[in-house]
Image (cartoon, helix red, strand yellow):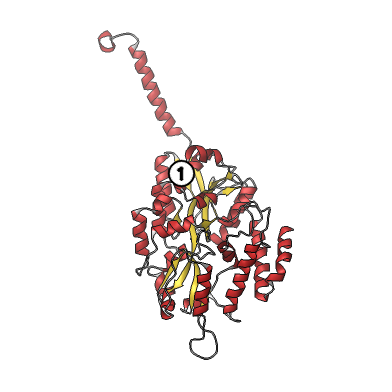
Amino acid sequence: MLKLFKNHMAPVGLVLIIVALLGSAYFADTREHVVLELGLYADSSWDVPQGQQYQWIDRVIADFENQHPGVEVVYESGILKKDYSNWLANKIVSGKAPDAFMILEKDFNVLASTDALVNLNNRVASDLDTSLFFPVALEAGRFGSQQFGLPVESNPVMICVNTDLLAKEGISVPQSGWTLQEFYKICQQVTKDTDGNGVLDQFGFTDYTWQQALLAYGQPLFDRSGQSVFLNTDQSKEALDFMTKLQELNGNYKVTTEDFDAGKVAFFPMTLAQYRTYRPYPYHISKYSSFAWTCIKMPAQTSNINATPVETSLVGISSKTSHRQLAWELMMLLSSNTKSQQTLVQQSQGISVLQSVMASDETAQILNTDNVVSEALTTATIQSMMADAVAEPRFKNYQALLKKADYLISQSLEQGTIETDLIRIQKELEQE
């Protein structure tokens, strides 16, 4: 024994080591199996066809589970976006909210203002390099001074151009930085009766909205907190006057997206997700194959005005979860991980919320593949759009107020009474 162990304490040390090893093995076999639930919807965030519903999320989950042995991430499949808000609300009310869940932008204000979400300020400050994100994407998850969600995917609005129609009229495709004056002039030039029967059958635009016009004049309808309404301002008056003049070009005819599909309209605001969906085969063939088209930045009154609307899908942590740290780590993998976000660009229709991913060579190749003609949407154009983008205001009743404003203003524009109605509409919105 002396020769083997050198001193009488050695057997005791060996026994302790063996006991420790056995204890570790026992703990590994009996430790709690953690199930982390993720709430999500099956279809696209952007209402376009999507053929790879769960591939991206399944890959992210596999990576997360590999990094966290003993943790299983589960989700309920088959929930459509149109049903998701009700599904999530019922889960929250019944006390069965997923640990982390995707958030539709239209739902964020209510969720953030009703204590359904964890305040992420401290975690963001300690764990995230916020400079990685497009500022407008990160802002989408902020309510007041608090960060309640991390951005996952963004979808800016561009304006689609029927390049064949412009070429037929001898008009060049506008360049980025073009103005509302150029927009109006081209609409005026192309709006006409092409077959001489006295009826307009070619038009300048469809689906350009008064909200987009306000942005183009640098005028938000509400301040960020919802305390002020900016309808009866000089900029708002100019924007709505511009909308009146645009609509007058079309006479009494209401131009539709079907007219654009038929090649009769020059301009149509389109989300980047629509662009990416309807550029390549097979959706290109069924949608816009009868004429050449491309997309450019939205026009503005001046080139220094941010006039690009953008939507951003978010992910948040339930305030009731008992697994906050794990939920946070899953969120970071979805939102701030370069590998995950690069895969999202490949398999989804929107864009990454990370600046480096949208500047990568891999993203450039994906965008080139998306395009079927030479006018490619480049990474530089997208980065310019996101720098020019404007996030929606963040206050609890924003969606309800916007819906009411849209009804009142659209009705007034149709009746041609917007100039005399502004003060009344402003007061109605302020009383909500």
Q: Quadrant of the N terminus?
A: top left
**Residue 238 pos. (x, y %):** 62, 67
Kind of residue at disc 1: Glu
**Residue 146 pos. (x, y %):** 59, 44
Q: Give the vertical position of 166 relative to 274 (above or below).
A: below
Q: Quadrant of the C terminus?
A: bottom right
Q: Give the vertical position of 406 relative to 359 (above or below).
A: below
Front position in the image: 80 or 221:
221
**Residue 192 pos. (x, y %):** 51, 83
Mark 1 surroundings within 10 Å by alpha-carbon count, few (fewer than 14), some (14 through 19), many (20 or more): some
**Residue 256 pos. (x, y %):** 54, 76
**SS of the residue under disc 1:** strand
Q: Residue 40: tell me if it is visible.
A: no
Q: How many marks?
A: 1
The outermost residue toward the bottom is: 197
Front position in the image: 30 or 225:
225
Q: Give the vertical position of 100 relative to 295 (above or below).
A: above
Task: Left or right? Give the position of 136 relative to 236.
Answer: left
Query: Which residue: 50% across, 37% down?
Result: 126
Front position in the image: 260 or 219:
219
In the picture of the structure, the residue carrying the numbered disc 1 is 72
Q: Residue 61: tell me if it is visible.
A: yes
